[in-house]
Image (cartoon, grey):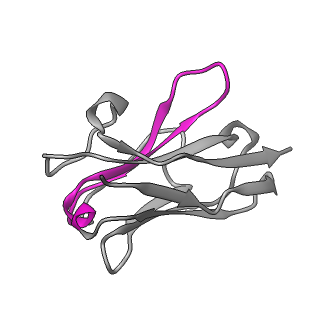
Amino acid sequence: QVQLVESGGGMVQAGDSLRLSCAASERTLSEMPMAWFRQTQGKEREFVAAISWSGSNTYYADSVKGRFTISRGNAKNTVYLQMNSLKPEDTAVYYCAARRGRDYPTTDQKDYDYWGQGTQVTVSS
């Protein structure tokens, strides 16, 4: 079974930066589209960013466009989310997800098959 593990979360002030990492337990995960979602207590999980299996195409939610960057590591079994100019509204648990059986990512969480346990990001004003 494919396992994803997120890391890099923490507590920062508005305007600071963080880089989240997602490591896969299986090398074949490098051929799957991947995405980052986030969830605040009491709200539905929302799309943040996604990347194609090749790493050539990226997609972002309007709320993070221009501030966040998703990328794949050289080994292609690691995905990063560089978060700059963080805002208090970015506070959430961030989850890494992978999609099985397709070449492209989507913005719908129901399309993803594998999930990490999440990492907390807290941004104070």
Q: Residue furthest front?
A: 1
The x, y position of residue 41, in whole percent, is: 67, 25
Residue 111 located left or right of residue 22: left
The x, y position of residue 75, in whole percent, is: 32, 79
Quadrant for residue 23, please give it.
bottom left
Q: Nearer the viewer, residue 19 or 66?
A: 19
Q: Nearer the viewer, residue 32 or 52?
A: 32
Q: Residue furthest right?
A: 125
Quadrant for residue 11, please give it.
bottom right
Is 120 placed above or below 56 here? Answer: above
Query: Residue at position x 64%, y 30% from top?
Result: 40
Is 76 placed above or below 122 here? Answer: below
The x, y position of residue 120, in whole percent, is: 68, 47
Residue 113 located left or right of residue 95: left
Residue 52 is covered by the magenta coloring: yes
Position of the C terminus, as image quadrant, is top right
Query: Residue at position x 43%, y 55% from top?
Result: 4
Disc count in the image? Answer: 0
Residue 45 located left or right of residue 106: right
Q: Residue furthest top?
A: 42
The x, y position of residue 118, in whole percent, is: 57, 46
Query: Residue at position x 25%, y 59% from top?
Result: 57
Q: Nearer the viewer, residue 63 or 34?
A: 34
Q: Which residues are magenta?
A: 28-54
Query: Residue at position x 66%, y 63% from top?
Result: 18
Residue 78 is covered by the magenta coloring: no
